[in-house]
Image (tube, rainbow, N blue to C red):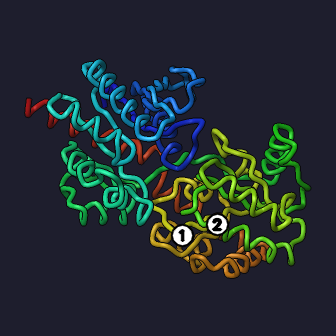
Amino acid sequence: MSSLRLALVTRRFWPLVGGAEMVMANMAEELTRQGHHVQIVTAQWHPGWPRQISHRGIPVIRLPNPSLRGWGTVRYMMALGRWLRAEHTQLDAVYVSMLKHSAVVATSRLQTSKVPIILRAEGAGDTGDCAFHEAANFGHRIRRTCQAADGFVAPSQQIFDEMISAGFDREKIRFIPNGVKIGPQRTREQRRAARAALAAANPILTMAESAPLVVFTGRLHPGKGLTKAIRAWPYVLQKFPNARLWLIGEGPQESELTAMIGAMGLQSRIILPGAFDTVEDVLAAADMFVLPSHYEGMSIALLEAMAAGLPCVVSDIPGNRILIHPNETGLTYPVDSYSDLARAINRVMADAQLGKRLGQAARQRVIENFSLERSTLDHVALFESLLETKRLSS
């Protein structure tokens, strides 16, 4: 396998952290480990941010993106087009996150070049890229332009099916599930050390060794169903008064969630500490993971929690059912039912053996099917095949 020169394009990136951003960060790191040359191209969301940084040893280029709605998107698209035109002779492939504005620019600017453009669809259902094409201004035009790309990655079967229904060429779509790093098996000592490290870094995360800790990691977005987790918490506290819930991440719902927690008098029981570059310590410190989403494609946060060996309680939606088999690799509950969510959490907290069994089975499922190494190798094979096709056709 030869070394590839790759640009990973994602309009949102660190310190804006969500599932799509973590996918690109993790893949960039693994591609580099496998010997490829990677750079990440993103937007400069705040004028004070430096134009170039290094993230996990990967060079990151930030392009102008003024905050003014509409004009910011235009400026970013213009800057991305200039960058691609200037750099495309130094690239073997361009991989773009989301079938949105970045994808339009990459596809239209490099369509006649020797550089294959691969677009990665994100999200499913009402929050997915295909739904965006139906609702957004110029959404149908964006979709038509995206359909001219050289290849597509669908990280879940639901996303694959939605793309087919939306008119994307089935022969161009590759189903490549998300992958995550597989760390060592968690131990009680690691849990203790992780809690101590987090408390030292941020005193708001200090908690008793005996206190059960449930975590969510991801974007604080209405589609994640986090208000249901907050409404469920008083029912959890009735049985486990020292239990804590951490909602790790950033996003548009942060103020609403903070106000809701305050109105319910749960300030010391539910914590919103912001986003973390990596969630390894958070998952090591936790006893359970919760994902109450209304929609998911294939959640990278859920995969990470499973890989860490945590018992997971998730909403019963198609994206989560891909990963969680009820009572085998986790527990599911009817979406939007916070009382059922509370009962599922309480069931795991009350039965240590159940939690251990679910966590071990979840971890094994990820090891066998969803490792970052395997996912990245599948991506590289796709990049190489499209690159060879481009060369032969030129």
Looking at the image, is mark 1 or mark 2 earlier in the sequence? 2
What x and y, as percent, mark residue 346? 77, 76
- Tags 1 and 2 in contact by the CB under 8 Å rule? yes
Q: Position of residue 22 (x, y in %)?
A: 53, 44
Residue receiving disc 1: 324
Find disc 2 in the rendering and name its residue.
Answer: 312
38 vs 138, nearest the viewer: 138
Q: Is residue 235 left or right of residue 160?
A: right
Res. 327 visible in picture:
no
The spot of residue 389 in percent (x, y) is 14, 37
Under mark 1, the amino acid is Ile
Q: Quadrant of residue 131?
A: bottom left
- Residue at the (18%, 55%) spot, across then down: 171
Residue located at (75% from left, 59% from top): 259
Above or below, 150 against 32 in this view is: below
Residue under the point 28% across and 50% down? 138
Give the answer, above or below, for where 322 lies relative to 155: below
